[in-house]
Amino acid sequence: MLVHLSVHNYAIVEHLDLELDRGMSVITGETGAGKSIMLDALGLTLGDRADSGVVRPGADKADILATFDLADIPEAETWLAERDLNNEGPCILRRVITAEGRSRGYINGTPCPLGDLKALGELLIDIHSQHEHQSLLKTDTHRRLLDEYAGATDLARQVQLAAQRWRQTRQELERLSNSGDEQRARHQLLSYQLEELESLGLGETELEQLEQEHKNLTNAETLLGICRQVVEQCSESDSGNVLNALTASLNRLSSVNNASGSLNEATTLLTSAQIQVEEAVGELNRFLDHFDADPARLQEIEERLDTIYTLARKHRIQPTEVAAMQQKLLDEIETLNANDESIERLGEELASFARHYQEKARELSDLRQQAATSLANAVEQEIQRLGMPGGRFTIELRANASQELQPHGLEQVELLVSANPGQPLKALAKVASGGELSRISLAIQVITAQTSRVPTLVFDEVDVGIGGPTAEIVGQLLRRLGDRGQVLTVTHLPQVAAQGHQHLFVHKVRGSDATHTAVSKLNKSERVEEVARMLGGIDLTKESLAHAKKMVVAAKA
């Protein structure tokens, strides 16, 4: 779970260190205080895009760290171990954005691409936003929600890849069959792949040099400090250095009467050592003079390495094998002969891919059928509790009309709803009002979150458009989720705020020349006052305080 969030110079936040606990943590504050800023900052550590505009005015960079306890997240520990990014203790994600717009990501202190932050973040936190209900109008979202609830996301990906392989193989088979010139067609394919590798122009030792230079640049300050220290010890220290010591030693030896020549060998060795130390100091000074820790060069290297790594992944080889792959393609082009065996082979592969697709797609359909009934029943119960009495909800699985193998399986998935008793079930986009859509979205999010393997759930103003008794039910639902893990929720509803296990209050601190956002963890009395403020405005009355206290106490019962 998320145990600590540190935000420096982000938006209107100058400095923020926040310790977080298990359970439901509610985040409230006045309009414009920046309630969602913490979550936006957290999103950056999880790989969200950013620009220089997020840096606090007057600062040179924004720096955000999120610390996670992985005790209950074995998938994340495995992910880190597979990439040699694990360490003993908590997992620390860091994101730095400069005022110039440059961005860096780190996992446990190691620089990493944003894609890695995003991939790891998906194992750590599940974020639900106030805008998610709009995505419910898209059938792609319907399918994704059902597959996630069914635990079939990986299987759905396998079906998609199977359809893709089948389609690519069919296209290649048709191309070869129609052209009647397999050699030319195959040659064209291999030439394209070879052109990619040749365009890369990877030198024999370039990858090793780039990786070493990248390592040097990312550790520039340490490297330069060591070199300067060695030069100081060898030749520049006033308190004594190696060259002075060697020179003094040679002078003493030369002053001795050495008629027999028994000390000649020692003198020669010391002279040689003096020369070698001088040369070493010269090399170090030249390195210091020419070493350029240019950020633009670092970015250039990272882009070049990314191109190499991307191409290696495309060919499913190690980056060090790119040159060998290029030679392999050359050899195949040189020995390629047209024959009918390839067409026969492709035909067999096509049939095999089709069988594999049907097997996986039927397996996916079975899971969807089972999950659709369970999810629909659960959502229907929740929307009725959320102020839609008599509302009905179902998930329709409609077989594809086309015989073409579809990347998303054998059926289309669509959510149908009847908001009022007696009304027929219709597509969500056709019957649901804005408020109803918000409630349905919230019900789905809460239900699907209960099956999530991710221990930290974030709800960013998902209760928009909801009020009254329904708001209290929403708070109870979120608290129930908090009982089994960690829930962070930004809310403007006192009924939801009263349900939290912890309460964080976001407010603006106005100085003489600047304003910044601060976050306070409220104690019992402060919490009652904040809930009362949410109930009745700035001026607190005995009635509003009593009502707020009753709500907070009732939530704990």
Image (cartoon, rainbow, N blue to C red):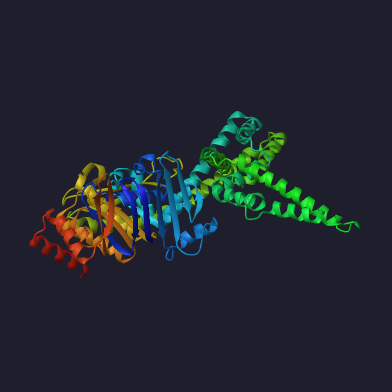
Name the one closer to the observer, 434 or 303: 303
Residue that appears at 47% across and 64% down: 89
Residue 305's x, y, as percent? 57, 42
Question: Would you identify the image quadrant in which residue 474 lies?
Answer: bottom left
Indicate whether 339 appears above or below 414: above
Residue 232's x, y, as percent? 62, 51
Question: Would you identify the image quadrant in which residue 186 lies?
Answer: top right
Indicate whether 511 appears above or below 545: above
Direction from residue 186 to residue 409 in the image, left or right: left
Residue at the bottom extreme, as displayed = 557
Residue that appears at 22% across and 69% down: 556
Direction from residue 556 to residue 262 in the image, left or right: right
Name the one closer to the observer, 58 or 315: 58
Residue 45's x, y, as percent? 41, 51
Answer yes or no: is residue 484 visible. yes
Name the one closer to the observer, 499 or 228: 228
